[in-house]
Structure formats: C-alpha cells, structure tokens
C-alpha cells in the first residue's frame, strides 16, 4: 500500500504534507514523520507503548521464572512466586551489587522490565494501564516514552547509589527490579503538568498517588523507596525540560525509538554477559 502524501499533524491535527519541515499551525518540526505518522496513529494515542510495556514485562517475568525453576520462591506478599535472585541478575536487575560490584551500569534501564513476584507485576501493570495513556494524552506518546526512560535511569541509579554508599538503615538496594520507578516518573510528569498547566485536579491526583506510595513504601516490606523517589524526580525534571505546553517534535519520536532500542539492548546485554556467571 502506497504511503499517503498528506497526514494529520500529531500535535494539532492540521493537515500537513509527509515531507513538510514544519507544521504551519502549531510549529511542530517534521509533523509527517517522514511518512510514518499514519502508521503510528493506527497503534493508538500512546504509540502502542502500553502494550509494549505490559507484554515485555510479562514475557520477561515468565522467562526469569523458567531460567531457574528450582529457585522460584513461594513466600507471601510482593515476593510470592518470585524468580530467584540469580535469575533476576541474569536478565538485568539493578542495584548496588550489579552496578558497583559487577559494573553492569546499563541495568538502570533493564531493571524496569523485570519483576519480583506475581503481586508485584500485577500492581505495576495496573499502574501502567492507568497512567501511561493519560500521560501520553497530555505530553504525546514520544515524550511519554522519554519521561518513562529517564525516570527509570534516575530511579535505579538513586537506589543503587544509596545501597552502595549509605548505611543500610537509610535504604537503597543491593538488587532491585520493577516498573514502579518509571511509573513514579509518570506521576512526577502529571505533578509538573498540574503546576505548568494550572490544572488543580491533575495536581491533586498526582499528590494523592505520591502520598499513597510513600505510606505504602514504609508499611510494606521490600519496597524500594529510593527508586520511587528517584523516579519521581526524574520524571518531574524530564517533564519540565520537555514542557507539555509546547508541541511534541519529530525528533522526540526518534529519541523515543532510540530509548526503546536501548532498553532492549540492555536486557540482551545483561543475558549475554551474565550467562558465564549464571549457575542455575
């Protein structure tokens, strides 16, 4: 099927040519995204990112269980039916031990796609379904992916550093996984939007989620509060840099695709380099 010669601008909905350098209505650069805008529009307002996260996390959770069946834990709480620590390390868990003891610095990306139990992944996937599409509606799909990625990097970097350099009493993690760090980044983006756009309702909703997560983090054992706080900060800063009141640009899409590619590479690199150390 031939590509159309004109499409709707993803930012403002105006008709533009696929090769136009700029939308005359909103100023977005490369609004036709070199002829691929119509394909991206067909996968939904979030550019299919919600499905990518849910299917990707689900597949890696099953793979981490299968890699070491004898090490699967059956304890209650967030760790119920948890992959073994060795299996999580293999697929790219982050924390003080992988990052500083083994130099696996790229795991600040891969850890967001791994989970430590049935309840853990179910709660996080509920958060993905509830938060990703609203943030994509406000920021655009590409900028949402950028926010999600930056929040993951900052969140797991904070947790790893705290686990390596701060007293055990102050938290931090030797081994940490989960989508909650980037999810808190989405909450940070909503919080910034409420302030920047003057939306009291969105701002109050974001504050409510933050308070609930803080309380949950202190009440429930095994919660990585440093990853949550770092993720929130990363999402807030990324949202401020990207500015939700300005139109999403074509180069944001390229950067978002690069972030997804780097996330995939981080998992593959973890497995390839981790296999010699893995003894199921």
Image: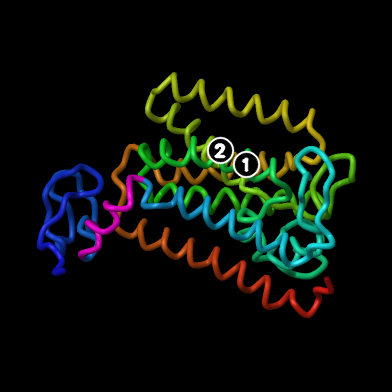
* Residue at position x 12%, y 54% in the image: 16
Quick one: 237 or 204, which is closer to the camera? 204
Q: CA distance from mark 2 to mark 1?
A: 6 Å
Main SS category, magenta section:
helix
| Residue marked by disc 2 | 126
**Vertical placement of residue 258 versus 233, above or below:** below
* Residue at position x 48%, y 67% in the image: 261
Residue 28 in the image: state x and y as whole percent.
23, 51
Residues in magenta, as a range: 35-45
Q: Quadrant of the N terminus?
A: bottom left
Quick one: 47 or 16, which is closer to the camera? 47
| Residue marked by disc 1 | 122
Which secondary structure, mark 1?
A: helix
Residue 22 in the image: state x and y as whole percent.
18, 56
Place residue 168 in its image quadrant. top right
Which secondary structure, mark 2?
A: helix
Q: Residues within 10 Å of mark 2 (few under 14, many from 20)?
A: few
Residue 73 magenta-highlighted = no
User: Is residue 21 toward the left or the right of residue 146 in the image?
Assistant: left
User: Is residue 237 toward the left or the right of residue 174 in the image?
Assistant: left
* Residue at position x 67%, y 70% in the image: 270
**Vertical placement of residue 135 versus 30, above or below:** above
User: Is residue 231 toward the left or the right of residue 46 in the image?
Assistant: right
Residue 58 in the image: state x and y as whole percent.
59, 54
């Amino acid at each position: 099927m031939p590509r159309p010669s004109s499409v709707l601008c993803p930012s403002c909905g105006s008709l533009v040519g696929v090769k136009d350098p700029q939308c005359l209505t909103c100023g977005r650069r490369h609004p036709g995204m070199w002829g691929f805008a119509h394909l991206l529009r067909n996968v939904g307002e979030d550019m299919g990112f919600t499905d990518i996260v849910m299917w990707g996390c689900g597949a890696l959770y099953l793979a981490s269980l299968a890699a070491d069946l004898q090490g699967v834990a059956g304890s209650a709480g967030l760790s119920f039916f948890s992959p073994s620590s060795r299996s999580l390390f293999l697929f790219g868990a982050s924390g003080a031990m992988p990052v500083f003891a083994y130099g696996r610095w790229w795991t600040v990306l891969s850890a967001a796609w791994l989970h430590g139990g049935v309840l853990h992944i179910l709660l996080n996937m509920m958060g993905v379904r509830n938060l990703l599409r609203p943030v994509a509606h406000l920021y655009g799909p590409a900028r949402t992916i950028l926010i999600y990625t930056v929040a993951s990097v900052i969140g797991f970097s904070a947790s790893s550093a705290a686990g390596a350099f701060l007293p055990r009493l102050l938290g931090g993690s030797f081994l940490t996984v989960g989508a909650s760090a980037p999810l808190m980044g989405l909450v940070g983006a909503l919080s910034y939007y409420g302030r920047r756009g003057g939306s009291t309702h969105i701002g109050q909703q974001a504050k409510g989620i933050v308070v609930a997560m803080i309380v949950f983090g202190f009440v429930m054992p095994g919660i990585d509060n440093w990853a949550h706080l770092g993720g929130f900060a990363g999402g807030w800063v990324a949202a401020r840099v990207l500015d939700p009141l300005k139109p999403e640009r074509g180069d944001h899409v390229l950067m978002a695709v690069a972030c997804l590619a780097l996330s995939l590479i981080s998992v593959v690199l973890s497995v390839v380099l981790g296999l010699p150390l893995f003894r199921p």
